[in-house]
Image (cartoon, rainbow, N blue to C red):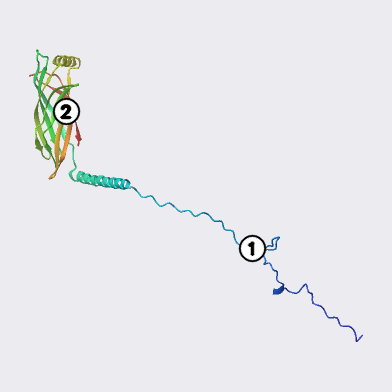
Amino acid sequence: MADQQKIHPVPDVEARPQTSSTAPLVPQGTSISEKGNPVGEYPPFHRTFPATHSKPPKKRSCCCKCLCWTLSLLLLQIVILGIIVGILFLVFQPKLPKYSIDSLQVTQFNLNSVNSSLSATFDVTITARNPNKRIGIYYEGGSRLEAWYTETKLCEGSMPKFYQGHRNTTVLVLPLSGQIQNGTGLISALQQQQQQTGNIPLRLRVNQPVRVKLGKLKLMKVKFLVRCRLVVNALSANNAITIQSSSCKFRLRL
């Protein structure tokens, strides 16, 4: 039994740890294709597109630039003018003048039996009021004053040149004269109007060029347009004419 054979354990080959020499040829996480090459070793695929060049911006034409500059300057002028008008309005506080017809006298209203023409001469008394305390009014020449019955102009005249100061009231007696060709038809229409209504409606139109004075500054010439409606009891020469109603409207025209 002394010669009993000793048995030494043989190390398990399958349990040996893998060394660098036995490391797998393909890294972990990659697969092997059928041809033996790993898929991860192919170079990445890059798709190329044709190069595109952006068009240069179009240059604005000279006409477009001139139009832009013109509109800008016009807008600037409007803004400046608005500021100036606002300042003047706050400083001078302008008020519209007022007008009224106080009396009407018929000095001539005769029918010519030879040619059936009618000669008319009126004296109209107008009161002009300037309520402004810092604004004066220069009444210039070239005015026109007309008296109408419906669509027929009876007579015409003009206003004198004068200056109306601050808060001033001026009374004007203005002569008007005219001649109507179809006087017979007009006399018949006036008589029929008076019999039906007991009165005769008239219209008075005034076109007056003026210059407004702001302090010491005299502005450009403008026109005062006055439209008056009045109703009288009759139209006959050398008789007292009564104004039953009268109203005037004022308008400014540049």
**Residue 157 drawn above or below residue 185:** below
Nearer the observer, disc 1 or disc 2?
A: 1
Return the disc, 1 or 2, that comes first in the chain's sequence: 1
Tell me whether the residue at label 1 lies in contact with that at label 2, contact meaning CB atoms closer than 8 angstroms. Answer: no
Question: Left or right: 170 with respect to 193?
Answer: left
Write down the residue under mark 2.
205
Along the line of sight, the residue nearer the viewer: 61 or 170:
61
Q: Quadrant of the C terminus?
A: top left
Residue 40: give its label: 1
- Coordinates of residue 178 in the picture (x, y in percent): 11, 22
Q: Secondary structure at mark 2?
A: strand
**Residue 187 drawn above or below residue 135:** above
Residue name at image x 17 percent, y 44 percent: 92
Residue farthest to the right, as pictured:
1
Along the line of sight, the residue nearer the viewer: 200 or 214:
214
- Coordinates of residue 210 in the picture (x, y in percent): 14, 36
Q: Secondary structure at mark 1?
A: helix
Q: Amino acid at mark 1?
A: Gly
Residue 97: give its label: none
C-alpha span from label 1 to label 2: 104 Å
Q: Amino acid at mark 2?
A: Arg
